[in-house]
Image (tube, helix red, strand yellow):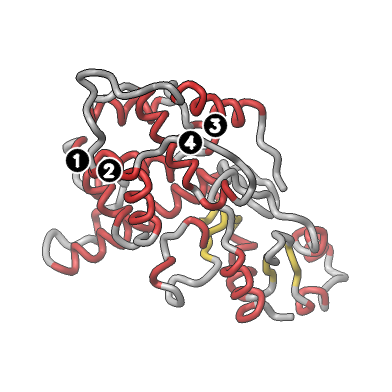
Amino acid sequence: MQAFSYSERKDFQFYPYRKKFNFMKKGQRLWTRDELILAINLYCKLPFGRLHKANPQVVTLANLIGRTPSSIAYKLVNFASLDPSLKARGIKGASNTSKLDKKIWDEYYENWEDLPFEGEKLRAKLENKSLEELNYLNQKFIPKEGKIQERIVKTRVNQAFFRSAILASYNNTCCITGMKRPELLIAGHIKGWSIDKKNRLNPRNGIAINALHDKAFECGLITITPDYRIKISKQIFKDRDQNIIKEYFLKYDNKEIILPSKFLPDRNFLIHHNNECFQQ
């Protein structure tokens, strides 16, 4: 398994001890549902090692909702402590998350189709922007109004969210080659978009992968096993004499993928790809 850097561990583990005796002060206000959804939205889009008060994105959200960067950072770490993929790796976080934190986290985690979009709408309203502007969508081919416009915008906003969440989790790194060029990376689905509607936007159903290997993964010529190892199809091995096949495929066979810092690929999704998509 991928080890965390000292700075990542310090960011994550420092907050619980700071906050252990940090009871609500007079005049402090409780977090609202909308604020928590905005915070989870940001949590999904940040690399694990960037959940701290000096991060410009944390500062921006703090200014938008009238809170301190420290309070946003604490909340992000609270959410990290609820992340099942971090729990599975033995990473401990804040021990005093509120009931509302957990309630909103569970609601978000069970409804990837709608809650991320709700977060984007809240953020757009705070920044006085349209959803298209907030997510840098090309408006040329989007109808100006109507149900079709709403459906297209929601789909594209959700796709943008999924990509941001996946690339952040993998620190803009291809899980197979280690390439760090985000413009050449795809947020690929393990279970296809048309197969599992509920998990289309679940970050644990995604991998950061370059375009060539994404196509091979989609075609079942490569897969990732439940223990996070790359497996190359026998169909590829038939062309083992080609240097390009050796360089781009065979050398990765049975190697462990570069793991994300959060949102580990769900083993059940990987099992599905192994059994239903992979060409043995």
Depth check: give the residue in front, 111 or 116: 111
Label 1 residue SS: loop
Q: Earlier in the sequence, mark 2 or mark 4?
A: 4
Kindly indicate whether the residue at mark 3 contacts the one at mark 2 (C-beta within 8 angstroms). Answer: no
Q: Amino acid at mark 1?
A: Lys
Kindly indicate whether the residue at mark 2 contacts the one at mark 1 (C-beta within 8 angstroms). Answer: yes
Pointer 4 residue: 95
Residue 221 placement (x, y as % from top left)? 69, 73
Q: Earlier in the sequence, mark 2 or mark 3?
A: 3
Q: Earlier in the sequence, mark 1 or mark 2?
A: 1
Pointer 1 residue: 129
Residue 217 placement (x, y as % from top left)? 62, 68
Kindly indicate whether the residue at mark 3 contacts the one at mark 1 (C-beta within 8 angstroms). Answer: no
Q: Earlier in the sequence, mark 3 or mark 4?
A: 3
| Tally of numbered discs | 4
Depth check: give the residue in front, 89 or 121: 89
Foreground mark, 3 or 4, reads 4
Instruction: Place residue 9 in its image quadrant.
Output: top right
Horizontal relation, residue 201 to residue 262: left or right: left
Q: Earlier in the sequence, mark 1 or mark 4?
A: 4
Pointer 2 residue: 134
The residue that appears at 43% across and 35% down in the rendered structure is 96
Horizontal relation, residue 205 to residue 5: left or right: left
Horizontal relation, residue 88 to residue 236: left or right: left
Q: Amino acid at mark 4?
A: Ser
Residue 177 placement (x, y as % from top left)? 70, 51
Residue 232 lies, with reference to residue 22, above or below; the image says below
Structural crowding at the residue carrying mark 3, measured as other residues with C-alpha within 10 Å and reported as few (<14), some (14–19) or many (≥20): many
